[in-house]
Image (cartoon, rainbow, N blue to C red):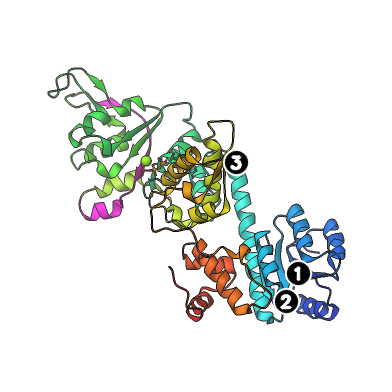
């Protein structure tokens, strides 16, 4: 079998159903194997790996849940779609928490199933790509300090890793607390200059009239308070990396001098008339939009191009919610002051994933640090999270814990499930559509149909 043929295992105790499904799938070019019950499925799974498993929930002897557990224990990448009767929906939803990709209820249309299969395979491909990226990154310094499993972060770190060993000027952009300084360190640590100085200057923290002397130093007596000669930061960074944080704050008087230095390596101390020389790799950061600053004539265009050979845009945390649980875990481990590791309960974690994080990762780190100190019995609960009022814990539990009897209508289950997913993702509809395995258009229709509201 050619390795690019996608292999699918179908598991169902209904033989007629199984053979119909098999020929439909083979018609689409998939390699299909079938198992008539859970035992047979596990036997086949012990000998080979599949890209996707279509798994009936209810089967005699070993049921779908057990097979799913086996798959997730042995083949984390294998995608599983549960096939279920209406009365098993609750179990199917539970299966999703165990790692199944999604479920369809019988009877279903072939097109519905095929759409789901396509999405599940897409997800598998994405996970694999992420794994490859992560693997490549793990060779790099600081790779275990920068947390992120989202495609956005992994791509960004991939680019950062690539530019690190070059001397190219890098501009790191992103809202406050997204990790700009951390990325700057990462680049330095992975560069050929990693045994040299990394010198940071926060341009926002220095009075405007002192920036030039901070950068280039001054001669004794060059201005009223210049009692001594002073080395500039470019001199300290000579041979190493110079990190100019909040570079947008540098005023228009100093910008030409910085540009000249970056072009030629030459500068003069304030009050000095001797040309001095230093060679630095420049990384800058800003949470302003430099393009706008240029348009407003507050930042020189030529300087912008000079510092911005490579741009790294760090997305706000709310746009990469899948990183939140990983970051929480990281900060819990990072802040182990006592011997005991703190844990977080599911509702509290749900809340953290829902929240918008205007202060991004820094805010999350602070919230966790505080909660870890205040919590009782080493368990962080909702009440330990100092989040703004107005953000209440979910009134609807997420999908896994819905309490329903078998008489409840399918529509109600669906409404509940979609509502839970939307809430958990803070109404990020495109992510929710992906999670639910439906198109954005379908999601909009469902929101309207069930009259779902944000609050
Ligand atoms: N991906 C990440 N993994 C682990 N820690 C992170 C990550 N991103 C940010 N942090 C942590 O969050 C805090 C803020 O990061 P950093 O200071 O780099 O942000 P910043 O973008 O420079 O913020 P500001 O714009 O306010 O200067 C730091 O403690 C940093 O270690
Ligand atoms: Mg910073």
- From the viewer's perspective, is the residue at label 3 or at label 2 nearer? 2
Q: Is residue 282 magenta?
A: yes
- The residue positioned farthest toward the left in the image shown: 224
Q: Is residue 267 visible?
A: no
Along the viewing direction, whichever of 252 and 400 lies nearer the viewer: 400
Dot 2 crowding, Cα within 10 Å, few <14, some 14–19, many 20+:
some
Q: Position of residue 95 (x, y in %)?
A: 69, 63
Report the quarter where the N terminus lies.
Answer: bottom right
Mark 3 vs mark 2, CA separation in Å: 44 Å
**Image mark for residue 138:** 3
- Residue 34 shown left or right of residue 306 in the figure: right
Q: Position of residue 391 (x, y in %)?
A: 42, 58
Task: Name the residue that disc number 1 marks.
Answer: 57
| Residue at figure coordinates x 20%, y 31% from the top left | 210
Residue behind label 2 places its C-beta within 8 angstroms of ligand 1: no
Along the viewing direction, whichever of 55 and 305 lies nearer the viewer: 55
The stretch of residues the image draws in magenta is 274-297
Along the viewing direction, whichever of 292 and 392 lies nearer the viewer: 392
Taking the image in four quarters, ligand 2 sits in the one at top left
Q: Position of residue 57 (x, y in %)?
A: 76, 69
Q: Is residue 56 magenta?
A: no
Q: Earlier in the sequence, mark 1 or mark 2?
A: 1
Circles 1 and 2, Cβ within 8 Å, touching? The answer is yes
- The relative height of residue 50 versus residue 253 in the rendered view (above or below) is below
**Image mark for residue 184:** none
Task: Assign a secondary structure to mark 2.
Answer: loop
- From the viewer's perspective, is the residue at label 3 or at label 1 nearer? 1
Q: Is residue 41 visible?
A: yes
Dot 3 crowding, Cα within 10 Å, few <14, some 14–19, many 20+:
few
Q: Position of residue 263 (x, y in %)?
A: 31, 38
Task: Assign a secondary structure to mark 1.
Answer: loop
Task: Name the residue that disc number 2 marks.
Answer: 85
């Amino acid at each position: 079998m050619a390795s690019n043929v996608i292999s699918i295992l179908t598991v169902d105790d209904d033989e007629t159903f199984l053979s119909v499904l098999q020929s439909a799938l083979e018609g689409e070019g998939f390699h299909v194997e079938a198992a008539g019950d859970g035992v047979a499925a596990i036997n086949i799974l012990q000998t080979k790996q599949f890209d996707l498993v279509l798994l009936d929930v209810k089967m005699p002897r070993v049921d779908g849940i057990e097979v799913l557990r086996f798959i997730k224990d042995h083949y984390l990448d294998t995608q599983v779609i549960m096939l279920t009767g209406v009365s098993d929906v609750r179990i199917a939803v539970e299966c999703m928490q165990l790692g199944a990709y999604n479920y369809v209820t019988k009877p279903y249309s072939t097109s519905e199933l095929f759409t789901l299969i396509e999405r599940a395979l897409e997800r598998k491909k994405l996970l694999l790509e992420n794994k490859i990226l992560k693997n490549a990154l793990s060779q790099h310094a600081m790779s275990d300090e920068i947390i992120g499993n989202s495609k956005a972060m992994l791509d960004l770190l991939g680019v950062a890793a690539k530019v690190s060993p070059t001397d190219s000027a890098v501009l790191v952009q992103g809202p406050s607390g997204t990790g700009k300084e951390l990325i700057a360190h990462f680049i330095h640590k992975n560069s050929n200059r990693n045994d040299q100085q990394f010198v940071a200057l926060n341009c926002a923290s220095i009075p405007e009239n002192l920036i030039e002397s901070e950068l280039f130093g001054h001669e004794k007596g060059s201005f009223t308070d210049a009692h001594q000669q002073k080395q500039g930061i470019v001199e300290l960074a000579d041979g190493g990396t110079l990190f100019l944080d909040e570079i947008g704050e540098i005023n228009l008087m100093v910008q030409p001098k910085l540009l000249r230095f970056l072009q030629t390596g030459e500068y003069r101390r304030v009050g000095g008339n001797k040309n001095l020389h230093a060679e630095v790799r420049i990384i800058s950061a800003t949470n302003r939009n430099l393009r706008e600053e240029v348009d407003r004539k507050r930042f020189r265009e030529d300087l912008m191009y000079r510092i911005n050979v490579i741009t790294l845009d760090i997305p706000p945390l709310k746009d990469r919610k899948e990183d939140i649980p990983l970051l929480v875990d990281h900060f819990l481990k990072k802040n182990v002051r006592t011997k005991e590791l703190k844990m977080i309960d599911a509702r509290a974690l749900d809340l953290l994933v829902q929240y918008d994080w205007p202060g991004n990762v820094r805010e999350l780190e602070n919230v966790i640090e505080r909660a870890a100190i205040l919590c009782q019995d080493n368990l962080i609960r909702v009440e330990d999270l100092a989040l703004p009022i107005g953000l209440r814990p979910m009134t609807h539990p997420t999908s896994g814990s819905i309490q329903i009897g078998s008489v409840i209508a399918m529509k109600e289950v669906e409404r509940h499930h979609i509502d839970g997913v939307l809430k958990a993702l803070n109404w990020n509809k495109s992510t929710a559509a992906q999670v639910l395995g439906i198109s954005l258009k379908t999601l909009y229709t469902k929101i309207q149909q069930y009259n779902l509201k944000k609050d």
